[in-house]
Image (cartoon, rainbow, N blue to C red):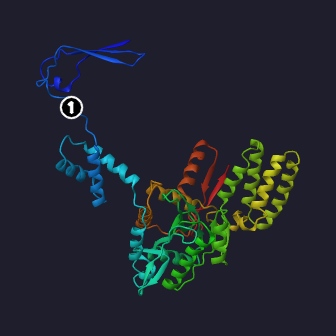
Amino acid sequence: MRTILTKCTSARCARVNVTCTCRYKINTCEMSGLVFVFQDGQHAMLDGSEGSPRAAKMTAEMKAFVEHEISMNSSVTPHVVFTRLCTVLQGQPPLESQVQGYIKRWRAKNRDDSMQPVIDICKQSMFELNRASSNSGDELLVFCDSDFENGSFVPALGNGSDGSPFRLGLTCFSLLEAYITVQEDPRCVTILHVDSTHNMVRQRYSVFILGYSDLCGHFFPLVYYCASQRRAEDVAWCLSYIKRVMQQLFRSRFAPKFVMTDADNGQYNACTSEMPNTTILMCWFHVCQNVWKKSRKLPKLQRTELFSDLNELHFCRTSTEFEVKKTLIMKKWRTVGKTCSRYRAVTKKIRRQWFDNPRFSKWQAFHTPPGCASTNNPVEQYHRKVKLVNSTSRATPIEMVRLLDQSRVGFLAKNATFSRTTQASKRVKAHYNKIKKRGDLSATVLPPVGDLRNQLVLQQN
């Protein structure tokens, strides 16, 4: 038997200027779980017959009323629903925070996944219906499939299946014009970055943000593209749509000099079919990431030597230098592989995928123009920013479209300019200041030479 002695803790007794003499004794049987409560004395509250106050809660009737209000107006605020509930229903009202929490949970579980709101946006901004007014600057342009019905075009977005995929692109005249300006400038080199990201919509559709980068590694989006599939025909659909729009608006051919992709067969097939004269480069970071996964079970010393060899090959200045070093390194790998079967298996996979495969073998630095990014890091960093805007992976299709459009408007508001000269990034400068402070590296800025002011340094390490 366990016994607890306690005083009165009633708030109504505390409001009276008299000490409450009521005491409680609570006996609990630990074997049977029975509880016996004994009271001694009287409460000091003014009305002893008044019942104990009830805790505020959402009853079934209140929940039904709240759901009815939301169904009548999906954008109604919790405060408005709370005031209406207190006016209509009798009895003790709930807390406003309880109404707000219930509405938040109900909306999360009953989101509108219908495509009708997306179709409405397409009807207003689809390219086929706005060709005459497409030169309107920052106004939204939507790329989507369409059908010709009753003398006009109507959106045909599909249901997301293999036979009827969902494909949608968001852009504007300003983004398209900025790209054409860079492509037609003889001083510039256009590198188109193609990569997909996920967890931005509850249907798990892939989101592609096609764009290009300048000599400082800054990313410039061209089209925000979402598709229910990642097949070659889906990526090719977006590229062909861009080609058609560029031809109609600017009388210019969409022809980037280079395309940077990861080891995705669908992206490679789409780029080769739609842009046969474009050089397709392989993202160096993706190569390193793939090799790291394959070599995780190797000893640390062998992994270090393996990446040292790959880095030496990556930074070759010419194809001739690469072939010479490749021959020596392959010979070295075969020698080490004779004494270690796991090392031999790993290097065999690396050679087959990143050396012998012509699709994904252009990851060396000499393939990339001087000063340009040799990875998809510009678009990866922009993906991160877009996901910060779209902080939920359970967004509905219309929410995803609106959030992508917000990212487009946000980028336009920055008024970013394409840099034609290479400059050190903030990250490189911070790293330099860090190692210089330790005394591990020293550099002296050389005198200006023509336009190369403060660009050349004499490095000593």
Q: Amino acid at mark 1?
A: Pro
Question: In front here: 315 or 260?
Answer: 260
Depth check, front residue: 296 or 123: 123
In the displayed structure, 341 sits above or below 181; it is above
Q: Is residue 374 left or right of residue 225?
A: right
Report x, y in % for residue 429: 55, 53
Quarter assignment of residue 459? bottom right
Image coords of residue 202 (percent x, y): 48, 57
Check disc 1 and report the residue beneath it: 53
- Which sits in the foreground, 360 or 214? 360
* Numbered marks: total: 1
Q: Quadrant of residue 3?
A: top left
Task: Look at the image and tell me in which quarter the N terminus lies.
Answer: top left
Give above or below for 10 relative to 301.
above
In the shown orientation, is residue 131 left or right of residue 208?
A: left
Give the quadrant of residue 98.
top left
- Give the residue displayed 44% in from the left and 66% down from the top: 408
Q: Return the x and y of residue 63 as percentages of the image width and height.
A: 29, 48
- Residue 231: image x %, image y %? 62, 68
Q: Residue at x 25, y 35 (%)?
A: 55
Q: Residue at x 28, y 43 (%)?
A: 59
The residue most toward the bottom is: 151
Query: SS for tag 1?
Result: loop
Q: Between 141 and 12, which is closer to the camera in this rendering?
A: 12
Is residue 454 visible from the viewing direction of this image? no
Above or below residue 335? Residue 449 is below
Q: Is residue 41 left or right of residue 60?
A: left
Q: Is residue 417 visible?
A: yes
Q: Residues within 10 Å of mark 1 (few under 14, many from 20)?
A: few
